[in-house]
Amino acid sequence: MAGIKDVARRAGVSTATVSRALRAMQHVNPETRAKIEAAAAELNYTLNTLKNHEPKRANSVGIIAPYISRWYFAKVIQGAEQVLQEAGLDLLVYNINKSEDRNRIFKDEYLRGRIDALISIAVPLDEVEFQSILDLNIPTALVGTSDKRVSSVRIDDVAGARVATQHLVNQGHKRIGLIGGMSNDPYKFPVPRDRRTGFLQVLEESGIEFDPMHEVIGDFQAATAAQAMGELLARRNRPTAIFCESDEMAIGAIQAIKKHGLKVPDDISIVGFDNHEMAEYFDLTTIEQPVQLMGEMAAWSIMERLRKPNAEPHSLVLPTTLVVRNSTRRLSPNEA
């Protein structure tokens, strides 16, 4: 009697794809599904033979992330962990910062049988990597990125950056600098690009010409941003305001400004992004994003899929909010 491997070989797909197709699950395009059903019919392979192949529950959920200790990732993990522990599920965290770890996860099927569901935090995946996740045939949720084939939870980084930049423009600032980006980004994170896009959009719409000399790289870390801010202060015609793509970079910028004998916001206004726990201590105006809630909602999403395997994936875009504190001020007409 033909088995699932025979069907997979005949259809030219993986056994996991055969399993999904014959159980009428998601993530199989119509052409592939038809090819698998035809192969199964030719080999007289029926759905009943699949019943003995259902995997045993591992009672655990995996999280993959490029960083574990950085604030954003730690908060997402904290939110997911809270929900999953209340549901009696274990949490397994996999750091894929190194290429060998990434290969182990995506190429060596390391996760198969170890987890019942997966949450991916801000990991841009190529199609081969994404297909390897789909082939696990488990509920999957993305945080910070999106793909219509699985559930996702994210914010609109372009919109958030627009609000931050518009706040500075409304305060009368025209020489506005930017601290953001990553100098060596092997993952091609969309966040730096999207926040920079929102920033530049508002400047263009406001008729403000952006000076490339007012942009420096902070690598999303306070120490690096402090050094970058020092470089920015040494350049000609320094900005009257800075948009930092994260609060940690904003905090580093504030520390550098003070070190150079200047004051925030008297000499330079600063806006961050995140509403980090330290933002209030530094009296930082910032864009608040519900990071922990994104982790919670991702966990709720995969738990729903565990209960209802055929439920449609959904994409959620959570709102951001401008939190105005005292790191920004309005310029007088003669200062603008």
Image (cartoon, helix red, strand yellow):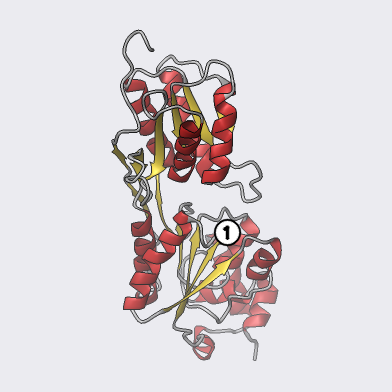
Residue visible at 64% across and 74% down in the picture? 109
- Residue 109 appears left or right of 325: right
The amino acid sitting under disc 1 is: Pro
Q: Position of residue 284 (x, y in %)?
A: 35, 39
Q: Is residue 175 toward the left or the right of residue 277 in the image?
A: right
The reply to whether residue 129 is visible in this rendering is yes
Q: Nearer the viewer, residue 307 or 329?
A: 329
**Where is 157 relative to 293, above or below?**
above
Q: Residue furthest top?
A: 334
Screen quadrant of the N terminus: bottom right
Horizontal side of residue 213 vs 333, given as left or right? right
Q: Is residue 106 left or right of residue 51?
A: right
Which residue: 58% across, 84% down? Answer: 45
Which residue is rendered at x = 35% and y = 40% of the image? 287
Give x and y (percent) for residue 115: 51, 78
Give neighbour class at mark 1: few <14, some 14-19, many 20+ (Cα, 10 Å): many
Number of marks in the image? 1
Q: Residue at x 43, y 41 (%)?
A: 157
Please tell me whether mark 1 sits on a helix, a strand or a loop.
loop
Quick check: can you spot residue 198? Answer: no
Q: Give coordinates of residue 75: x percent, y percent.
A: 41, 59
Which residue corresponds to mark 1? 66
**Location of residue 218 with respect to 301 vertically, above or below:** above
For the residue pair 27 and 336, the one nearer the viewer reads as: 336
Q: From the viewer's perspective, is residue 235 above or below residue 325? A: above
Q: Quadrant of residue 216?
A: top right
**Quadrant housing the C terminus:** top left
